[in-house]
Amino acid sequence: MGKMKDRIRDSRLWDRICSAEEAASWIKDGMTLGLSGFTRAGDVKAVPFALVERAKKEPLKVNVFTGASLGSDVDKMFAEAGIIRKRLPFQADAVMRKKINAGELLFVDHHLSHTAEYVRANTIEPIDVAILEAISITEDGMVIPSTSVGNSLSFAKQAKSIIIEINMAQPSLLEGLHDLYDPEKQGERSPIPLKKVEDRIGTTGIPVDVEKIKGIVFTEQLDSPSTIVDPDDETQMMAKHLIGFLRKEVKAGRLAEHLAPLQSGIGSVANAVLHGMLDSEFKDLEIYSEVLQDAVFDLIDAGKVRFASCCSITLSEKKMNHVFGQFEKYRDKLIMRPQELSNHPEIIRRLGLISINAALEFDIYGNVNSTHVSGTNMMNGIGGSGDFARNARLAIFVTKSLAKGGDISSIVPFVSHVDHTEHDVDVVVTEQGYADLRGLAPRERAPLIIENCAHPLYRDQLWTYYSEALERGGQTPHVLEKAFSWHIQYKNQGTMLQQIKEKEMA
Amino acid sequence: MGKMKDRIRDSRLWDRICSAEEAASWIKDGMTLGLSGFTRAGDVKAVPFALVERAKKEPLKVNVFTGASLGSDVDKMFAEAGIIRKRLPFQADAVMRKKINAGELLFVDHHLSHTAEYVRANTIEPIDVAILEAISITEDGMVIPSTSVGNSLSFAKQAKSIIIEINMAQPSLLEGLHDLYDPEKQGERSPIPLKKVEDRIGTTGIPVDVEKIKGIVFTEQLDSPSTIVDPDDETQMMAKHLIGFLRKEVKAGRLAEHLAPLQSGIGSVANAVLHGMLDSEFKDLEIYSEVLQDAVFDLIDAGKVRFASCCSITLSEKKMNHVFGQFEKYRDKLIMRPQELSNHPEIIRRLGLISINAALEFDIYGNVNSTHVSGTNMMNGIGGSGDFARNARLAIFVTKSLAKGGDISSIVPFVSHVDHTEHDVDVVVTEQGYADLRGLAPRERAPLIIENCAHPLYRDQLWTYYSEALERGGQTPHVLEKAFSWHIQYKNQGTMLQQIKEKEMA
Ligand SMILES: CC(C)(COP(=O)(O)OP(=O)(O)OC[C@H]1O[C@@H](n2cnc3c(N)ncnc32)[C@H](O)[C@@H]1OP(=O)(O)O)[C@@H](O)C(=O)NCCC(=O)NCCS
Ligand SMILES: CC(C)(COP(=O)(O)OP(=O)(O)OC[C@H]1O[C@@H](n2cnc3c(N)ncnc32)[C@H](O)[C@@H]1OP(=O)(O)O)[C@@H](O)C(=O)NCCC(=O)NCCS
């Protein structure tokens, strides 16, 4: 109990300590919950499970809003228990994905900087209960988040009541790293006074109305480690191409030697590409990103990163032990912000980020699909990729040129779903090379993308499509009858490769 | 000459007065020109014509960068003379459109707030010569723009040399209305200190290095009047629906009685919808827009607008006479800014604009096509619609549900080109009604759009597509084989209507 009270430094709150089951019992059917958690980090780990248990005995449907994806199998359990009516703004769980695509629950795919605006303006379902992981609560009732900040500030402000999970397993050295800033209502706000990645503009915790804190649950469980895989030959090639491009920019005087603040997206590919910076000449790097994955800490260890601002820290198991085992080493190089800030267009544009995100596929004109397999099935969600790509100094998208053992070309005539339009895509990179699309018209883009980025297996096929499209003319030439023929053929015949189709038909 | 010298108050510049022909003679083959002009307003009217004359005698190709579309038939003449290699970031001329779509010149379709960033960062062709319309040049060498600001500030700053056209026909009372502010380089800039639509944050003219001013040409020619048509029954219905929606928002406490600063796009439909506000209860309106069209001045006349910030003033002939004939009446309600500011994500998000733009078509999930007819042929360009829609408090798109006498449904299964993704589209409006898409998943959006916005002629057809898509499942159900079948049928058979096709085939 003494240890617990150390973590609840506001003694007014000592009587709120309760069990996860009790806290879960306050949640009513039909409510909207605002949960902490961003890409597996800093999610609540007890009340969701108690809720799932309850749902075995009584019918229960809730809306679940979070920062981004959850770890600890919470999304999986929620999906299996069938207790979710609506989920937003992001998820990355295989079971939930399946249920979403089967239409069993509603998924709303937001730009991650937008959710807080919608909550604040009361244009989506109001938050009944905010359930937030914390390290501690301060003397004056400020809630100190753990390994992610997500939407916790805006959920806490708008929720009718709040449940806190104090996680004793999270490194308490995180306290002091967070920078909580609320831009306030649109039309009544001031400029956000952040000019450098390290600028501290808010408080170290979430100021809450303690009257709203209904219960405090104690947990002791680490975040789920990230599932990314190590860099491979192809991602190393991609990193090499990207570094080559950046080097050219420095030479042309368009970038400084220390580049510009970097944002790097989620997933194995984005991590691997950033990891490739280890072998570059670039140093004194700055990071202004959503998630810090393993690569950022490798770069810090190598003395290449001056400072990193983020919204969450999501590491593999090995890296987690390494980093949190000697966290003093990293503490003065880190700051953690709400996703509304880490992804805010005002800041992204002002700082002029170099933004690197992964794509599922892009087309010959540079439109990018980040979310929908074959235009229909949700993978994860757009996440922050749109926040960054639209406003960055350099919006870079990376993908391997092939997927599914070569049966899919990630460069297609027409993307089956558009998340980022040609206006927002500056450079595309695959293991084959890169295409710098800045200032190019569609007819200049297509040949460059086909030659530099497509896999040789598919290059002729793309040229054939483009030539036929050119005969029809237009600013963005297309053969609408064939625009999706590659995706259709993949569905029907298991490959996008034309020759095979022709062979089989012969 | 005296009158001329009155307009060039910096006597160091008197010796720069020259003829348009002389100025045009300085332009070399292969150069990149930065021209003033934004939606027919404030474009240069003499040097371009002299250049076209020159091109009759010698081969000449140049890149032409502007604010937005030009009037005075400049784009038409340029296109006919074949002197353009690359044109950006917007145009709206029928002849140029044809040449673009035939691949005879390159057109780069930018977000209008982005061009200045590209020019400043030197990532597109550097500006050799800026050619800018002005009302006057001040004692200290500041160039006072005329009826638009466009990209003139950044062109002037970056250009190697500058040619000024002083237009004696433009109302000199415009002097003092402009607010020139340069955010400076990304990574080195401060927050933009604008908090209210009327805030003045810059200078009243473009500060230039007078050494760069090579020539000053005098002209006396009004801007080309806008080509918009008057509101009709359908646009009046659209305005009624929109006002109904806004009224509901006020009632729900999400909007104040005076709403929020309004942005309204180009074209007849956007103008007509804004015009409809005349018959509403809303007053003390604020405008923070790109272009002010006729409707804004109707609203000012009716005492409904408190203040309007813009980048250009583009009026019909009648309205131009009315407004400029008694400009004192409007002067204290207006401010004019560079397009980088009128369209800046930082400001749009901070003020929380209500943004109303016209679409060519949208699909059952709320993706919007603003630019490409049948996915291929450029209409005008994305303009500022993306700057606004992404960052607005309310991103509203309007279109008539039918085009081409009913042969086209503007609500389709899958838009043939995506300019605005479902993430950026809050409300869609046709003369049939509106669909409020905020916080809705794709499967919630489709029924609402079909029922509320599609024309009854096409409703069943949309339901048929959507039902078949639902059988396939997915977050965003589609039948890829049929996604573009409506556009294809229109091309082949002149109508998107299925029954007719079936009748003909029987
Ligand atoms: C696009 C995204 C899914 C890529 O993830 P990744 O882990 O880097 O990439 P991978 O190459 O391992 O691909 C992931 C899966 O997509 C599949 N895939 C890749 N390209 C594909 C394509 N063109 N068509 C179909 N499937 C494809 C892969 O085969 C793999 O499938 P598996 O899980 O069954 O093995 C991921 O980055 C994402 O969700 N992005 C959207 C959100 C975002 O960008 N956030 C950034 C801000 S943090
Ligand atoms: C979309 C846009 C073309 C609509 O213009 P408008 O004048 O309001 O609309 P209209 O209904 O008169 O349509 C213009 C033309 O498009 C055609 N059109 C409309 N919908 C169409 C569709 N779904 N398919 C094909 N053509 C269509 C009309 O028939 C008309 O053709 P016409 O010129 O041959 O008569 C115009 O708003 C635009 O260019 N927008 C993009 C830029 C922008 O939004 N800027 C906003 C910030 S200022």
Image (cartoon, coloured by chain):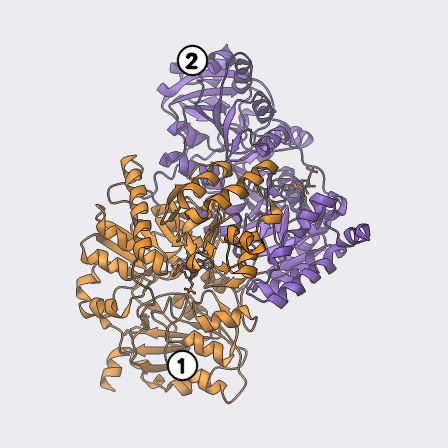
Chain colours: A orange, B purple
Instruction: Count up the numbered dots.
Output: 2
Q: Tell me, yes or no, if residue B360 can be seen here.
A: yes
Q: Residue at x 46, y 39 (%)?
A: A447
Q: Position of residue A212 (x, y in %)?
A: 41, 77
Q: Tell me, yes or no, if residue A290 can be seen here.
A: no
Q: Position of residue B187 (x, y in %)?
A: 32, 44
Label 1 amino acid? Answer: Val
Q: Residue at x 63, y 68 (%)?
A: B471
Q: Position of residue A173 (x, y in %)?
A: 22, 69
Instruction: Dividing the image into four quarters, tell me where ligand 1 lies.
Output: bottom left
Same chain letter for marks 2 and 1: no
Residue B16: numbered disc: 2
Q: Residue furthest bottom?
A: A57
Q: Position of residue B159 (x, y in %)?
A: 39, 26
Residue A5: numbered disc: none
Q: Residue B323's quadrant in the figure?
A: top right
Label 2 amino acid? Answer: Arg
Between residue A345 and residue A211, name the one nearer to us.
A345
Residue A47: numbered disc: 1
Parent chain of label 1? A
Parent chain of label 2? B
Q: Residue B206's quadrant in the figure?
A: top left
In the image, is residue A91 above or below residue B361? below
B261 horizontally vs A13: left or right: right
In the image, is residue A231 above or below residue A9? above
